[in-house]
Amino acid sequence: MSDATQNPPPEGPPEPGTSSGPPAGSMPPPDSGQAPPPDSGQAPPPGPEQAPPPGSEQAPPPGSEQAPPPGYGQAPPPGQPAPPPGQGYGYGGAGSGVGQPAELLMRFLARLIDFILLGIVNGIIGAILIVGALGLNGGGNFGYGTGSSFAAGAISAVISAVITLGYFTLMESRTGQTVGKMLLKLRTQGPGGQHPTTEEALRRNAWTAIGILGVIPVIGSIIGGLLSLAAVIYIAVTINSSPTKQGWHDGFAGGTQVIKIG
């Protein structure tokens, strides 16, 4: 056999000092023990307990929050006069109606109470006058048909008219209330919201003195009663048809009004 023919290297373990790894200068494989990828040490993504990103909370659209309607303590709209004391622009006490115009029924009951009280007073005065007239006439025919009885009737009519008109005028001009209005929590006010003046109260209640027609013999009391009834009916109709619950006697007085105060 020639020298060019050589035996193959033995198939055994590598000799000590040799390495079976890749040649020098080559890169190791990715999983050969290098550091973990950069994202393995980052913080977890935002969870539900983190603050929402900017812009997620938006302001309410314009006009969604409106100012409350005007009520007590607010200035009246431009060009409108201020409401009278005790009244506001559409809003009174919670469900109480304070400062609002009084209804016809409440006003009728207040007048009824006043007329009952006045009837008692005037009845006592009339009885005294009649007894006096009977005494002057000597008791004959109970005083009827004589001049003294007519005189007693005329005087009684005048005194009743004066007491009735004076009562309403004095009470309303001083306090704005009669006994009936005090009991039912009502008050009469003048055009400017204050108590009516003496003139306003006198004009407002002038119809209550119609009974003075009783000075006319025989038919005077009948005519006075019918006219008083007609006045009451007309006042009730005008109050009920008025948005502000003002009767013709309120207009005759210059614009008085009855309001609730409780």
Image (tube, grey):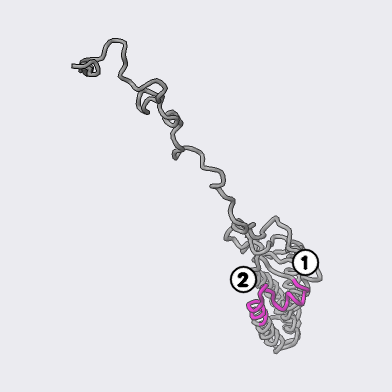
What is the magenta range?
234-255
**In the picture shown, does residue 99 fall above or below 212?**
above
Q: Which residue is mark 2?
A: 103
Q: Quadrant of residue 85?
A: bottom right
**In the picture shown, does residue 255 fall above or below 226?**
above
The amino acid type, in three-letter code, at marker 1 is: Gly
Query: For the point 70% across and 64% down, which residue is it?
Result: 177
The amino acid type, in three-letter code, at marker 2 is: Glu
Q: Which residue is mark 1?
A: 79
- What percent of the width, then of the height, locates residue 37? 42, 29
Q: Is residue 239 magenta?
A: yes
Query: For the point 68% across and 61% down, which residue is it?
Result: 88
- What percent of the width, then of the height, locates residue 22? 35, 22
Please say whether residue 53 is visible from this viewpoint: yes
Whether tag 2 and tag 1 are in contact, CB under 8 A, the answer is: no
Where's the N terminus, which quadrant?
top left
Q: Residues within 10 Å of mark 1 (few under 14, many from 20)?
A: few
- What percent of the width, then of the height, locates residue 125? 70, 72
Q: Earlier in the sequence, mark 2 or mark 1?
A: 1
Q: Nearer the viewer, residue 55 or 155?
A: 55
